Amino acid sequence: MIIAGEASGDLHGAKLAQSIKNRCKDIFLFGVGGKAMKTEGVWRIVDTNSLSVMGITEVLAKLPTINRAMATVKKALKKSRPDLLILIDFPDFNFHVAAVAKKLNIPVLYYIGPQIWAWRQNRVKKIKRLVDHMAVILPFEAPFYRKHHVPVTFVGHPLLDRIPPMPSRAPSARRLKEPIIGLLPGSREKEVSTLLPVMLEAARIFNRCHPAARFLVSCSDSIDENLVTDAVSQYVSTLEIEITKGPVVEVFKQSQLLVAASGTVTLEAALYGVPTVIVYKVSPLSYRLGKRLIKVKHIGIVNLIAQRELMPELIQDDASPQNIAETITAMINDPERLSLLEEELFHVRDLLGGAGASDRVARIALSLI
């Protein structure tokens, strides 16, 4: 059984499913996933899209759906008694499933573990009790788990399996007379409904100084396209703006600069060498609660890896249209700063280990069976 509760986890789960089947043809995979895992032959008992949500108060609104999914998963776990349970991120859901598996003596492999090094570090005790092996994707995670005597392997980041190494090119390759700005509002509907209007208003302000600028709005496969088109429709008369559906790589290739919701996509942008401004907003209550618990200086994964702020972070009240517009204006108007940042982003890959994360996790998975 494999459980991936979010869009990015679905992609990593699909690649892992492929790697496992390459090593063991006679295997049945089932669980929680999205389109990508389904395509790789994982029989879905719950669709990932029905579960994806961010923020403490936002979870409450989706609680009935989440509880139904949990009941379905627990029932399947007890009935099928799989030889292995693989959990991919999504900790608040997956911890409950891991507890059931433990009672049934089903081994548990956790791939892409929760960011307990950032907040709620006491959860490492729960992981030590419920999880047989951690497969972690960030270099600083393995020492954390070893310190707490949890079996762990640093497998490298799965994005490196999908993004081929790129030669460090001349930063001027994307320099145009007028800029192209990519807007990436996220892969959850709540994120998009919160962040996209702010991004579009920032684009309108930026457009005053750069009237020929173009804007590319990314619409994730996990998002209802109408949510994006309705927001964008209010700006098409004043901005040169285009919606890009599906893989975000085309936005990366065309954009000089991105404004992106905090998440895996910002690391993906770094691996393509695209300077990015990270923005994020949650409900005021979620923010106040989270701020008390967070133990790290940055929320952007690239900045955490680099241990300094390569990508500007505008969070909560700082993520206003005016602040976003001023930040991207300052960056676009400083080509030397952009060039230096592009080169620094290319070096982030060196800190993430080599490609082959999915194959390494597949080996661990089969060794636990």
Image: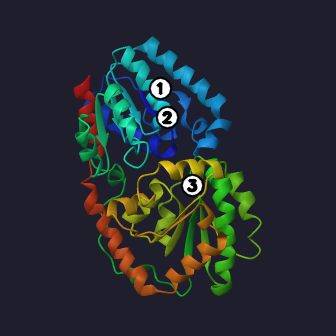
Q: How is the image coloured?
A: rainbow
x and y, in percent, of residue 21 in the image = 32, 31
Q: Are marks 1 and 2 in contact (CB under 8 Å)?
A: yes
Q: Earlier in the sequence, mark 2 or mark 3?
A: 2
Q: Residue furthest front?
A: 292
Residue to which mark 2 is pinned: 92
Q: Nearer the viewer, residue 50 or 301?
A: 301
Residue at 64% x, 68% y is 320
Query: Image height check: is 235 above or below 84?
Result: below
Dot 1 amino acid type? His
Tell me the mark number nearer the camera, choosing from 1 and 3: 1
Q: Secondary structure at mark 3?
A: loop
x and y, in percent, of residue 262 in the image = 51, 57
Dot 2 amino acid type? Asp
Residue at 25% x, 28% y is 366
x and y, in percent, of residue 284 in the image = 65, 53
Residue at 43% x, 40% y is 89
Q: Residues within 10 Å of mark 2 (few under 14, many from 20)?
A: few
Give the quarter of the image for residue 18. top left
Dot 3 amino acid type? Gly
Residue to which mark 1 is pinned: 96
Residue at 28% x, 49% y is 156
Query: Image height check: is 71 above or below 37?
Result: above
Left or right: 82 as drawn, with respect to 59: left
Residue to which mark 3 is pinned: 186
Tell me the mark number nearer the camera, choosing from 2 and 3: 2
Residue 221 visible to the viewer: no
Quadrant including the N terminus: top left
